[in-house]
Image: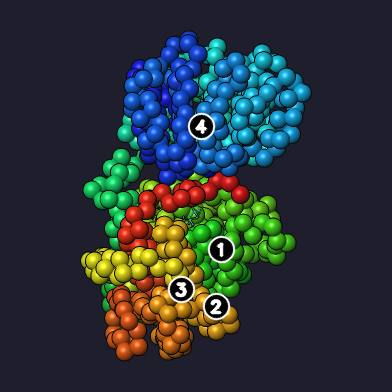
Amino acid sequence: MCGIVGFVGHHQAAPILLDGLSKLEYRGYDSAGLAVRDGEADPVLVKAKGRLQILSDKTDGGKTVVGSCGVGHTRWATHGEPSENNAHPHCSDDHNVVGVHNGIIENYQELKEKLVRNGYSFYSDTDTEVAIKMVDYYYKKYKMGPIDALAKTMVRVRGSYALAVMFKEYPGEIYAARKDSPMIIGVTNGESYLASDVPAVLKYTRDVYYIGNLEMARLTEGKAEFYDLNGDQIEKPLVEIKWDAEAAEKGGYEHFMMKEIHEQPKAVLDTINSMIRYKDEVGEDGTKISGKAFIDLASIGITDEIIRGIHQIHIVACGSAYHVGMAAQYVIEDLARIPVRVELGSEFRYRSLLLDPNDLVVVISQSGETADSLAALREAKDKGVRTLAIVNVVGSSIAREADHVFYTLAGPEIAVATTKGYLTQLVACYILGIQCGIVKGQIPDDKAAELIQELNTLPGKISKILDDKERIQWFAAKFASARDIFFIGRGLDYAICMEGSLKMKEISYVHSEAYAAGELKHGTISLIEEGTLVIGVLTQKALFEKTMSNLVETGSRGAYLANVTTYGNYSVEDSTDFTIYVPKTDEHFAATLAVIPLQLLGYYVACARGLDVDKPRNLAKSVTVE
Ligand code: M6R
């Protein structure tokens, strides 16, 4: 996955392209490049290995590259190592076609051979160079213009792409094609923008078009035209982006991750509010109950009738979103007594699936673009099963293709390590679980009211945990050079451990493992040495003593014992070395609170190790490759 941008208008393109790329660096940051045209002149290509700053320094912030039409790219290498040679843009040998690409061309070897037979040679190891030369080949062969050349390429290519190209004979124009990789197009007075994600254009315009799958676009100054695969022009609605540019800035925090951790109370509140309504009612004894809260999933098309018909729920997701699914499994099964299976997106599609038409497949994804989750969604749809997407990015592929969409209202999440995305997904699952429980007759009215009321207390409780973050910072500094960290818990606490462990390893590079506490003794406990940090998560009353005794078992093998538990469980201090308390809540919602100290711990350990928290090595924000 990578980030692409394009600009055509009255200003110099290079500084705008660099600025746009800086908002997309979360998508890839191992090399970058741009191609800019000044009128009819050949494009000037500049590329650099490493962070975008190197490209910016090389072009003096874009000032040395003249021209008002161009495309740019920030790369996360898939085909070919990160190098200047493999960096985009790529071009045909005569500079007839030059372009940038996000995605994967699966059959690039086969296409390359075809092109070689037709006299083409290749300078890079990338699939993108093949795609660009394929466009050039069809452009020259059929002589029917850019849209036709793109359409013919799209028919031949297998894989995913957001492609932005310029043609020598069409100065002041950018052509785009899309399948399965995100791309938006923004327009404003006399200027047009193209980008993989909204933050890249938000400074310039809030009016965007979402280009659909297997569609193409032609951008000129302040205008965008759209075409289908037949080359016929199609109309698209202009959509106004509601959130402002500041939402995608650091706002005084050192890192996006810390900013996003602090945005969690609001993100959770907004997500809850989006599905809770209030009504006046008359109770059984005739008294008037004013403003009774209720969940309204009808607004996303999930009616009581649909819920009544659900036999089983399959949650499909990747990474942290999968951990949400793990937590949701405990919550939904307990509240609604509906069997829930949780599957990794990358595994779901490669099994012989036993899906029933009465099942509901829930795909959870912050970006809405994760290739494995998207593929799983399509698989489920192909099998005729109803799909619900829990997604943050409006208009993303998963959101567009699912039968129902529950948008989490986290706002833009930039840090590679998800925090507010994860928390709002959890809340969405709680709401789904409660409503299923009510409709399936498992949750009586008074209990439903209690649960909804408790949901509303979560934002305040999250803020309270954040107020005490300095203690966690102190603790993190103590373990900044740890070699291994283990997170242990049972049941829902185990699901919380999985997320805590991922937060730790992905940004601090400290090896960590999440373990079901009762499983330790079946092998893993042999890894415990003098001083190894073991963190127990103990939020579930019925499992408290069992997990505690597993924790103590590691302590007697020399481990340093820390734990996250709820206020009131003060006995933990007798047997462990460091305790983090979180406010009490309904036990179903414990993950929302207990994960916060673990997010902070991962963050502070990474900072203490001097690492780039927002852009950890080898990772990117949305994983649009399988
Ligand atoms: O955009 P998605 O929610 O589909 O992303 C899924 C994972 O790639 C993501 O959660 C990843 O694991 C994060 N880096 C975790 O912080």
Q: Position of residue 405 (x, y in %)?
A: 49, 53
Q: Nearer the viewer, residue 190 or 236?
A: 190
Residue that badge 3 annotates: 486
Which amino acid, mark 4? Glu
Q: Nearer the viewer, residue 243 or 582?
A: 582
Q: CA distance from mark 4 to mark 3?
A: 40 Å
Numbered tag placed on residue 315 in the rendering:
1
For label 4, the SS is loop
Q: Relative to 225, is 357 above or below?
A: below
Classed neighbour count for the residue bearing mark 2: other residues with Cα under 10 Å, few (<14), some (14–19), many (≥20): few
Of tags 1 and 4, the one toward the viewer is 4
Classed neighbour count for the residue bearing mark 3: other residues with Cα under 10 Å, few (<14), some (14–19), many (≥20): many
Which amino acid, mark 3? Phe
Q: Position of residue 616 (x, y in %)?
A: 43, 51
Which mark sits nearer the N-terminus, 3 or 1? Answer: 1
Residue that badge 2 annotates: 524
Query: Image point 38% across, 39% down: which residue?
Result: 23
Which mark sits nearer the N-terminus, 2 or 4? Answer: 4
From where the camera sits, is residue 566 visible? no
Classed neighbour count for the residue bearing mark 4: other residues with Cα under 10 Å, few (<14), some (14–19), many (≥20): some
Q: Relative to 39, is 476 above or below?
A: below
From where the camera sits, is residue 136 visible? yes
Give yes or no for contact between labels 3 and 2 (Cβ–Cβ under 8 Å).
Answer: yes
Residue that badge 4 annotates: 84
Give yes or no for contact between labels 2 and 1 (Cβ–Cβ under 8 Å).
Answer: no
Of tags 2 and 1, the one toward the viewer is 2
Q: Quick check: 203 left or right of 512?
A: left
Q: Position of residue 280 (x, y in %)?
A: 30, 67
